[in-house]
Amino acid sequence: DQQVKQNSPSLSVQEGRISILNCDYTNSMFDYFLWYKKYPAEGPTFLISISSIKDKNEDGRFTVFLNKSAKHLSLHIVPSQPGDSAVYFCAANGKTGANNLFFGTGTRLTVIP
Amino acid sequence: SQTIHQWPATLVQPVGSPLSLECTVEGTSNPNLYWYRQAAGRGLQLLFYSVGIGQISSEVPQNLSASRPQDRQFILSSKKLLLSDSGFYLCAWRGGFGNTEAFFGQGTRLTVV
């Protein structure tokens, strides 16, 4: 049962434009959400996070928005750069087991120069 | 600062052979440790987690096992590999409490032939 879903497996964006990656979750008990970036043959690296008490968190070119009522979060990258091309995973804090994170299936972002 | 080491980076093993992947963490004590597998269409699947020495929990039934012989060492094993065990395996650590990010190793690409 996939509790965190990324319904778009891929996204292509022109350099300089905005990239919007979406993520939906089903468990209303999730209280902390993260975005990771992953290059091929490497481990994921942490990008940005947001607590459920907020609806927006910004860090440079990256902004995460959380809509709790819709159980939806999104990552905005603006302006997009070719180096942003990677697979992006969203994750949610499960508060079960050992502080486990539940990951989505990933979205492959390609930024076209 | 904390670092996580995972090895080997790549591994080609015949069907029926044993497996041992090792992960060590430096710069922190009593971390929560995790083994994930990245599979196509399923994102990052949590395989095992550990909250302390000798404490292992399994998230999915499978041909693999995990052990934590020391506080900062986590080992993924198999007695007899199957073709379906091929994949990209990731070790991660996270603080035991609160909302923090997880840190990943570089991953091991396992190919069972």
Image (cartoon, coloured by chain):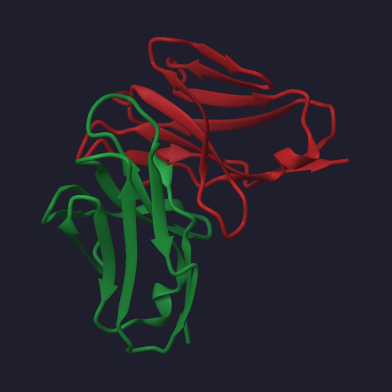
Chain colours: A red, B green
Residue B19: tell me if it is visible: yes
Quadrant (top left/top right/bottom left/bottom right) for the N terminus of chain B: top left
Residue B63: tell me if it is visible: no
A95 vs B6: above or below: above
Horizontal arrangement in the rendering, residue A98 relative to residue A54 (left or right): left
Q: Which residue lies furthest to the left in this view?
A: B54
At 11% from the left and 56% from the top, the residue drawn is B54
Q: Please state the total of marks drawn on the protein image.
A: 0
A57 vs B105: above or below: above
Give how far across and how far down residue A9 sits, in percent: 62, 47
A110 vs A29: above or below: below
Give how far across and how far down residue A43 sits, in percent: 50, 51
Between B66 and A64, the one lying in front of the other is B66
Give how far across and how far down residue A74 sits, in percent: 57, 25
Between B5 and A97, the one lying in front of the other is B5
At 30% from the left and 83% from the top, the residue drawn is B18
Between B7 and B108, the one lying in front of the other is B7
At 28% from the left and 34% from the top, the residue drawn is B95
Q: Residue furthest right?
A: A113
At 62% from the left and 57% from the top, the residue drawn is A40
Give how far across and how far down residue A7 sits, in percent: 57, 41
Between A94 and B55, the one lying in front of the other is B55
